[in-house]
Image (tube, grey):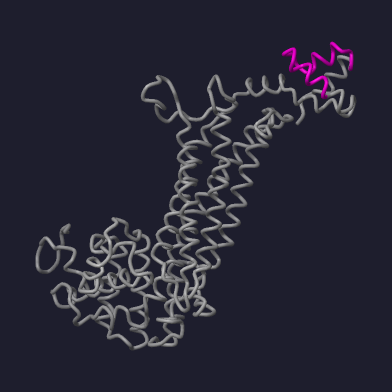
Amino acid sequence: MKARQEHDAMGSVMVPADAYYGAQTQRARQNFAETGLKLPGEFIRTLALLKRFAAAVNAELKLLEPKPAQAIMAAAQEIMDGSFEDAFVVDLFQTGSGTSTNMNMNEVIAGRANEMLTGRRGGKSPVHPNDHVNLGQSSNDVIPSVIHIAGGIGVQRKLVPALEDLRGALAEKAEALRDIRKIGRTHLQDAVPIFLGEEFGGYARQIELGIIRVKSSVKGFRELPLGGTAVGNGLNTHPQFAERVTQMLASHLEMDFHPAVNHFEAQGARDAVVALSGTLKTLAVSLSKIANDIRWLASGPRCGIGEIHLPSLQPGSSIMPGKVNPVIPESVLQIAAQVIGNDTAITLAGQGGVFELNAMMPVMAYNLLQSISLLSIAARSFSEKCIQGLRADAKKCAAYVDRSLALATYLVPKLGYDTASAVAKKAYAKGKRIADVVLEEGLLSEEEVKETFKEKA
């Protein structure tokens, strides 16, 4: 068992983490498979935050004596500050309500609170993990509440800012590249010319719409199931408990949380999680489209499209000297694949709501928070290490336009579709430009050709 250094009134000693949790956590460790996966740190810290405010409210309601309440709050704050990380040992794949993680937290808080009050670590007196730390709560309303709080924090503080930075970088690049004419492409074939800035403006709009969708989807997380206790009817909790704790959370986090409108819905279903995950999947698909386009546009540098050049971050090959790969777009594509897979797991877990409880909450929490974190990292990295530093190859863009057979499209209003098509076929067969064939055939004057093919998109 990993040991930790503790400094207290008893002196500096090596303290095993299991001194802070009790029998229920021990049984959970013994009875569940050790996959090596745990609920992430942000989940644990958010759970501790909820316990801190629960103790404060129970003290206000005269349900807890001041000293035990203060000790519970202090212990919870230490966990929020990063202490006792090695004391949270329950595997991700546990009971579907997350009871094992909830009790792990209750026992660690009680164990540390008892140490503060008596100098003895662990135990159930004077602070009991169920009677005091878990007072007015059930795993069945606490765990889904923590999913909503941690998910809401992740979206508001990590994901949306990262996406806004990426949108801004794409919009700036669109402006910088607005005058560079290039060939458009549909079906992986040449199409009529566009401007490179227009292409990047489309990417910026994709991310802008992604931000709108994410903000809309996370609104479902504002309702907290707290207060429903075991089955949604609020048994054994004070009628003011949930409202007061939720108000504290909302004020502390500066987020619009409020008690669930219907606690039976709030505990029996995890539809809000499924909805947000679906939006994150859509965002992953958007990032995939943009990342794929950019790595194709940068392909080469001599034998591919090569219309843009990406920042060179690292050698791209262990065998081919001088090769540089699109590292960041490829990392974004892999993250997108993971998020799409996470959404499938969350969708299936969302079907685990049977009667008054969804019994697949830990895996939903893990995958949702991972998706939020990964997309935040992807957006930030894409913006800072790829988009901001890429540049256009204006000469190559112009050369592609000049030789494109799609320029025959501009002839249609003057010569008709069939004649324009014949010109394109002849130009392709002879390896000539569209303009050259038009002049050779005497279809238009030189002045008309210049007017027809002047720079426009």
Left or right of 113 on screen, residue 48: right
Residue 214 pos. (x, y %): 56, 57
Spot occupied by residue 85 in the image (x, y as percentages of width and height): 26, 60
Q: Which residues are magenta?
A: 421-443
Q: Quadrant of residue 6?
A: bottom left
Question: What's the residue at 62%, 38% (across, down)?
Answer: 200
Residue 353 position (above or below residue 229): above
Quadrant for residue 128, please give it: bottom left
Q: Main secondary structure of the magenta part?
A: helix
Query: Is 295 colored magenta in this rendering?
Result: no
Q: In the picture provided, is 196 more to the left or to the right than 380?
A: right
Q: Quadrant of the N terminus?
A: bottom left
Residue 151 at x, y = what percent? 46, 62
Q: 188 and 402: which one is in front?
A: 188
Q: Does residue 382 appear left or right of residue 136 in this picture?
A: right
For the point 33% across and 84% down, the residue is 59
Residue ID at (33%, 82%): 135
Q: Horizontally, is 128 left or right of 140 in the view?
A: left
Please state the horizontal and vertical placement of residue 152, each as a whole percent of the image: 48, 63
Looking at the image, how many numbered discs can be counted on the residues? 0
- Is 422 contained in the magenta span? yes
Answer with the quarter of the image where residue 166 lies: top right
Which residue is rendered at x = 36% and y = 25% of the image?
318
On the rendered image, what quadrant is the C terminus found in?
top right
Q: Is residue 449 above or below residue 255?
A: above
